[in-house]
Image (spheres, rainbow, N blue to C red):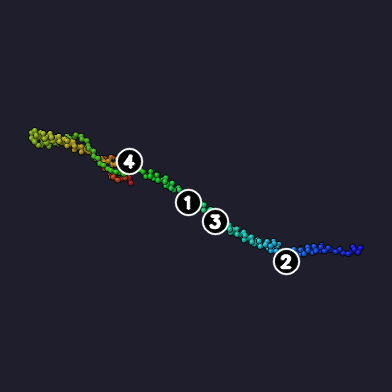
Amino acid sequence: MDNDLQPRRMHPLIAAAAGSVVVVSLLGVAAITGVLPLARSTDGPAPTGNSSQYALTSPQSQPSWSTQPAAASQQGTPPTQQTQYAPQQAPAQRAPAPQPSYAQQGAAPTRQQAATCSTCGTVQSVEPIRTQGQATGLGAVGGAVAGGLLGNQFGAGNGRTAMTVVGALGGGLAGNEVEKRVRSETVYRVYVRMDTGKTRYWTYQSAPGVQPGDRVRLENNGLVRAG
């Protein structure tokens, strides 16, 4: 009975283990609450007490991070616009370079053909041509009568008769020649060098009114001054 009433004693190892658990628990609580600041290690992870401070300060630092990308995007906008303008200017300067030369080469023959006038030319010479008239016999008769009368004035007898005959013959020939000259005409032949390269001539019964070197054109089968 006496042995059962005596209190049981705790084993020393159990007591030491329980004490160490209590001490470690107290140190953990003190470290969490910040009572033991010296217990933190510089190489270890950040204490949970400071994580609340980081959580409070992080919302303030986030606007600065969000503004920096916005500023960077605003600063980066002009370079993107410049890179868009650069390729648009390059083809605008290269495209028209070969085209004007082809257009000018094709227009030159057209202008030369338009400048060539098939009815235009330059007067080379104006030649008067005299055509002898045709005698009708009236001149010869008149000349013979006049010559006979004139020859009858010379000589006497048979000599007068001979002079009359000679005067009549001479008067007839002279009268015939005079009639031809009276009936003769002068025409004018105008030679023109055409712009096509050919040489043509026109005949006028009177003075044409042009001279060598004049520019003329054909109009109504005749020549008129050009310009």
Visible in this render: residue 208?
Answer: no
Residue 93: numbered disc? 1
Binning the other alpha carbons within 10 Å of mark 2 as few (below 14), some (14 to 19) or many (20 upward) gives few
C-alpha distance separating marks 1 and 2:
78 Å
Camera-side mark, 4 or 1: 1
Binning the other alpha carbons within 10 Å of mark 3 as few (below 14), some (14 to 19) or many (20 upward) gives few
Q: Is 29 situated left or right of 205 in this image?
A: right
Name which residue type carries label 4.
Answer: Lys
* Residue that carries the numbered disc 2 in the rendered image: 36
Name which residue type carries label 1.
Answer: Gln
Q: Residue at x 72, y 65 (%)?
A: 39
C-alpha distance separating marks 4 and 1:
49 Å
Answer with mark 1 or mark 3, whichever residue precedes in sequence. 3
Q: Quadrant of the N terminus?
A: bottom right
Secondary structure under badge 3?
helix
* Residue that carries the numbered disc 3 in the rendered image: 79
C-alpha distance separating marks 4 and 2:
127 Å
